[in-house]
Image (cartoon, coloured by chain):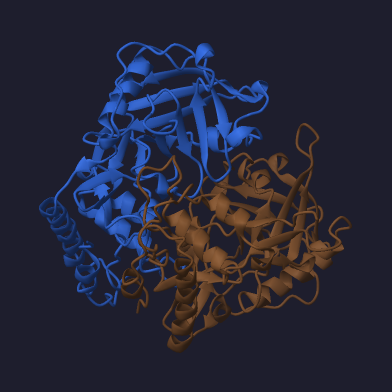
Chain colours: A blue, B brown
Amino acid sequence: MRLLPALALALAAPAVAQDAPEPPTPTSVVAAAPASDWRPIEPANLLVMDLAPDREGKPRRVVIQLMPPPFSEGWVENVRTLAKAHWWDGTSVYRVVDNWVAQWGDGEDDEAKAKPLPEGLRVVPESEYTVADSLDERQARFAAMMARVLEVQGQGKTIGFISNPWLDSYADEVGFDQGWPIASGNDSRWPTHCYGSVGVARDLSPDTGTGAELYAVIGHAPRQLDRNIAVVGRVIEGIEHLSTLPRGKGDAGAYDDPALRVPIVSVRLGNEVPEFPQPVFEYLASDSASFAEYVRVRANRSDPFYKVPAGGIDVCNVQVPIRRVPSE
Amino acid sequence: MRLLPALALALAAPAVAQDAPEPPTPTSVVAAAPASDWRPIEPANLLVMDLAPDREGKPRRVVIQLMPPPFSEGWVENVRTLAKAHWWDGTSVYRVVDNWVAQWGDGEDDEAKAKPLPEGLRVVPESEYTVADSLDERQARFAAMMARVLEVQGQGKTIGFISNPWLDSYADEVGFDQGWPIASGNDSRWPTHCYGSVGVARDLSPDTGTGAELYAVIGHAPRQLDRNIAVVGRVIEGIEHLSTLPRGKGDAGAYDDPALRVPIVSVRLGNEVPEFPQPVFEYLASDSASFAEYVRVRANRSDPFYKVPAGGIDVCNVQVPIRRVPSE
C-alpha cells in the first residue's frame, strides 16, 4: 500500500511572502544549513580506490562510502575483509557499459585461473537484500518526515505545494535513511540503485556474490536491480574516473582486449589511508529540516533559470548533499 | 489529475501458463516483434555529427534523431537551418558535466566574438515548450494504450499484474508518442528529458535559445528541465563519444583550457550524408502490441537473473528499442 500521496496533497503551503528577496536554490539551502544538520562520514566507512594514473600521469582516486547498517551488512563486511586483505591491489576495472555500469575486481570467468579469495568471507543469503519492516514502522517514518516538512513550512519558507518526492514506480514508498535513498513496501525496505550506487556483481541464483566483483552505476537509475543485487555503497568523489572510461566491446561490455583493463593500484578502507586521519566528508542529515527544505526546493526550482517548477522529484534525482568537511 | 493508477490496478493478469517454457526477456520480445511493428526513421530526421577522430585515430560519429511534430517544432526547424548551413563545422564540444550533460556549439560568451548565425532562425516563444492537450485527448490516449495492453493479455503472454509504468513524480501522466517518452498534465503535453535527450541550451529568460548550442544528457534523467528547455532530439548511436569525454573543470563544467575542446568536423542532416541513402534506423512503434509487451516485460523482469520483478518502471528507463534496419 502507498501511504503518502493523499496526506501530501492535503498540505497546502502558505502564500508567497510579499517581500521575498531571492528564491532559494538547492545551493543556497545547503549553504545555509547549520553545522548541526551535517553528519560526519567516518573514514572506516570509506573505501578509497586508486586506479593507475591516466595518460597524462594524473592520479585517479575514487572514494566510496559504504552502506550503513541495517542494509546489506553481510556483503559490506565482506568488502571490509577484502579491503583489509588488500585483495583488490593488482586487479582492474574490466567492464564498462554506457548508461549502465563500470565493474571491477578479478574479472576472471575461469575458476581455475581466478584470484584466490581471502578467508572469512560470508555467503550471504538472498533474504538480506531487504530488511524487515512493518506498517507501524512505515507510518512512524512517514509521520516523522512530514513533521520535518511542516517545520519547514512553519518557518514560512515554502512556495507552492510541498512536493511529494515519494511517488515511485518501483516501490510503495521511497524516502531517506541516514542520508541514503531507501524504498519500502509491504514488510520490508531496501537500498535503491541510483547514479553512483555501488553493488555486488553476481552470477545467477543461488549465488549472491562475494563482494569481490563490484560495479558503480554510471547511467540512469537501474531500479529494476533493487532487491536483486546488494547495494553496498556509493561513489562520493571521483566517479568521473569510472564514467569516462572507454566502453567495452566484448561480452556484456567487458573489454575484449585485456590491455584495455584499467589497473587498480590499491583499495583501502579510509582509516588505513594516511591522509584520511579524521572525517574528511560529511552528509546533510536526511532527518534534518535543512534536508526537507533541500528536497522541496529541488522539486520546485524557482531560481531564475526555471520557468515551470516540476512539483515533484524522483528519489534518485534528489542527490543527498555530501561535501568535504569545511576547514575551520 | 491522474487518470491511470486506478484503471491499471483493476487489470489482473491471467494465471501463468503451466507449460510456459522460457520467460520472455526484453530482448526476446524485441526479436519477436513483427516487421509491421517497426517504423522507419527517415534520414532527413537525423543529425549526423562527426567529431575529430580520437587519439587512436578512430572515427567518432554521433547520430541524433530529431523530435517529430508537434513537439519543439520551431527549434527543430532552426536545427535543420543550422545543419544545412554547415554552421557547426569547426565548432566544438566545450562543456561536459558528470551525471548531467555534454554541450556543443560555438561556446563563446562574448557576443562580439561569437560565430555569426545563419539567416532564417526563428525566435521561438516559451509557449512552445508544450503542446495543447485536453482531458478528452488524454482519456482517448489512455484508452488506446490500455487496449494494446489488453490485446497483449489476450494473447496469454502476461505473468503477474500488468505494470503501471505511467506513475511519475513530474507529471500527471507519462506515456509514448511516435516512439518518444512524453508527459502530460492539465491542458498540455511535452517531451521528457531522459538519458540521451538532446536539448537547446539557453541563457536566462526571455531567451529560449536558437538551437545553435545543444547538449545531450549523459546522466540520470534531469526531468526538472522538462517544460524549461526545448528537447529537440535524442542520441540513437555513438553517445559514448560524448559520455566518455573528460569532465570540464571551468565555470559550469566548461573546459577551462580551450585545447581540451573536442573539434566538430561536420554536422549534417542524414539525407545529406552519402552513406545514408535510405532509412538506416527504425524504432519499435509505441502504439504496437509488441511495445506494450516490451514495457510490461521490462517492468516485470522474469529472466533467470531477476529474483524479484519490480512491478513498475519509470518512463526514462523504458528505453524505446531503436536499431539499424536489418539487411534483407
Residue at left offset 57%, top offset 35%: A96
Towards the viewer: A128 or A5: A128
> From what the image shows, is residue B94 above or below residue A273?
below
Describe residue A224's horizontal placement relative to residue B110 as left or right. Answer: left
Q: Residue A109 versus residue A83: which sits nearer the camera?
A: A109
| Frontmost residue, A217 versus A242 | A217
Query: Residue A183, how many percent across, how many down?
Result: 28, 50
The N terminus of chain B lies in which quarter of the figure?
A: bottom left
Q: Using residue B255 as the reference point, say whether residue B205 is left or right of it.
A: left
Q: Is residue B113 visible?
A: no
Q: Residue furthest right?
A: B274
Q: Position of residue A304 (x, y in %)?
A: 46, 67
Q: Position of residue A285 (x, y in %)?
A: 24, 45
- Residue projecting furthest to the front: B19
Percent from the top left, x then y, of residue A78?
A: 32, 22
In this view of the protein, can residue B144 be seen by the observer? yes
